[in-house]
Amino acid sequence: MDLLRTWNHVFKLDPNKPISDCDLDIICRSGTDAIIVGGTDGVTFENVTDLLERLEGYDLPLILEVSDMEAIAPGFDGYLIPMVLNSQEKRWMFDIQHEAIKEYGDIIPWEDLAVEGYCVLNPEAKVFKKTNCRIPEQEDVLAYAKMCEQLLHLPVFYMEYSGTYGDPELVQRISSELKETTLVYGGGITSGAQAEEMFAYADVIVVGNIIYEDMNRALETVRAVKR
Ligand code: 1GP
């Protein structure tokens, strides 16, 4: 999954949200670097494989962000495994991964996997509630980032503001701390200007919701980082 280091812009598609063939085609031909398939609820083996089949004809890396063990489908180019750093339950950091390895350890394609140190920063986000997170202070976020890079040697630190636009100053601060670990920013990007602002600091920006709300603005976010 070294590939991830070379990306700037990624669209995240939610398998639980309908998207027309026409919109899917526009997204896949937009110039984005990869498609992540992922969501918090209603993600099933069926809707993941259905979306994968519709995406397979395009020459783009297709990555599954695993949120539910039952919905892991073969056939993706890579798999992102979140470890929710600011969850108050060990389950979301280690236990579900442990269970998955216990059950599927013999068939896991380890070379196609990357672990994301996930820091959820929007208290209204579904993932925040589902994984029982606590809002970290800025110093906590900085410590999570250092922990990710220096202690756990994780390839990715993901600042997840899903559904709301985050704090560019904090993203800048984290970015100046990380050297090896790739900084991914996602959340509330709905315009070219916001994409540009976050991309000034993050290595990769992830754009999700706006795809389903305003395709033109979704496309602006690609143009903003691909100039
Ligand atoms: C969600 O970080 C992504 O996991 C993107 O967030 O849907 O708010 O764009 P949005």
Image (cartoon, helix red, strand yellow):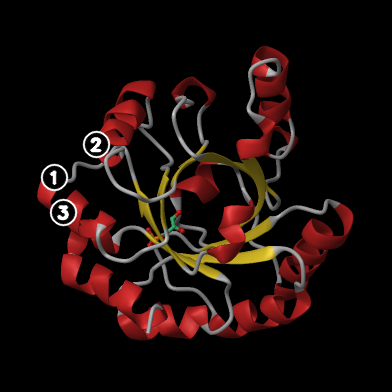
Q: Secondary structure at mark 1?
A: helix
Q: Say if mark 3 contacts mark 1, CB within 8 Å.
A: yes
Q: Secondary structure at mark 2?
A: helix
Q: Quadrant of ligand 1?
A: bottom left
Q: Residues within 10 Å of mark 3 (few under 14, many from 20)?
A: few
Q: Residue at x 48, y 20 (%)?
A: 70
For residue 98, side relative to residue 60 (left or right): right
Q: Amino acid at mark 2?
A: Arg
Residue tagged by mark 3? Answer: 23
Q: CA distance from mark 3 to mark 2?
A: 12 Å
Q: Residue at x 41, y 67 (%)?
A: 164
For residue 205, side relative to residue 120 (left or right): left
Q: Say if mark 2 contacts mark 1, CB within 8 Å.
A: yes
Q: Amino acid at mark 3?
A: Asp
Mark 1 and ligand 1: say if the CB distance to the nearest ligand atom is below 8 Å. no
For residue 20, side relative to residue 152 (left or right): left
For residue 203, side relative to residue 51 (left or right): right
Mark drawn on residue 54:
2
Residue tagged by mark 1? Answer: 21
Q: Please identify the quarter of the rendering in which residue 71 is found.
A: top left
Q: CA distance from mark 2 to mark 1?
A: 8 Å
